[in-house]
Image (cartoon, rainbow, N blue to C red):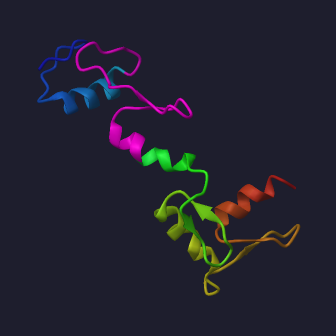
Amino acid sequence: MDCEQCGIKLKGSRSYAMHFKKYHPDKNRTKFPKARIMCEQCGKIFTCMAHLRYHMPIHAEQKQFKCDICDKRFAFKANLMNHVVIHDESRPRFECTVCGKNFSNQQNRWRHMFLH
């Protein structure tokens, strides 16, 4: 198929979409327009139903995955798994030199420093 903007030959709709996004980001495509699926709860737009299904747990009243150490809850198991490592005592701590609060990584401490 040919690009409607520059005429370059492309193999399929996926390569067409990638090409269009990279080389014509300011143009609207008429061939193979993006699907637009909206979350009814927050209005966020997705390009496929799988992305909407992955998104939906954030709206759950009670987050399904709970940290056994601090009781913080998460919509996704992967987020809980990333969180649990902050409780590992063997991990290095990054302490705020102003208030003494500890952080699990340098970036979080750096972001916190802007509060002072």
Question: In the rendering, at what x and y percent does residue 73 appear?
Answer: 61, 63
Question: In the rendering, at what x and y percent does residue 78 appear?
Answer: 47, 64
The residue positioned 19% from the left and 28% from the top of the image is 13
Instruction: Report the side of 109 relative to 97 (left or right).
Output: left
Of residue 18 and residue 61, the one placed in the foreground of this image is 61
Find out whether residue 65 is within the magenta segment: no
Of residue 25 and residue 65, the one placed in the foreground of this image is 65
Task: Name the image quarter holding the C terminus.
Answer: bottom right
Task: Say above or below: 112 vs 24.
Answer: below
Magenta span main SS: loop
Task: Say above or below: 12 vs 73.
Answer: above
Of residue 4 and residue 32, the one placed in the foreground of this image is 32
| Mark count | 0
**Residue 74: quarter of image:** bottom right
Instruction: Report the side of 75 relative to 51 (left or right).
Output: right
**Residue 35: quarter of image:** top left
Residue at the front extreme, as displayed: 61
**Residue 22: quarter of image:** top left
The residue positioned 57% from the left and 74% from the top of the image is 84
Question: In the rendering, at what x and y percent does residue 68 appear?
Answer: 61, 77
Residue at the bottom extreme, as displayed: 90
Instruction: Report the side of 38 relative to 93 (left or right).
Output: left
Question: In the rendering, at what x and y percent does residue 51 appear?
Answer: 38, 42
**Where does the magenta region start and end?**
25-53
The residue positioned 56% from the left and 50% from the top of the image is 60
Task: Say above or below: 19 vs 103.
Answer: above
Task: Name the image quarter holding the N terminus.
Answer: top left
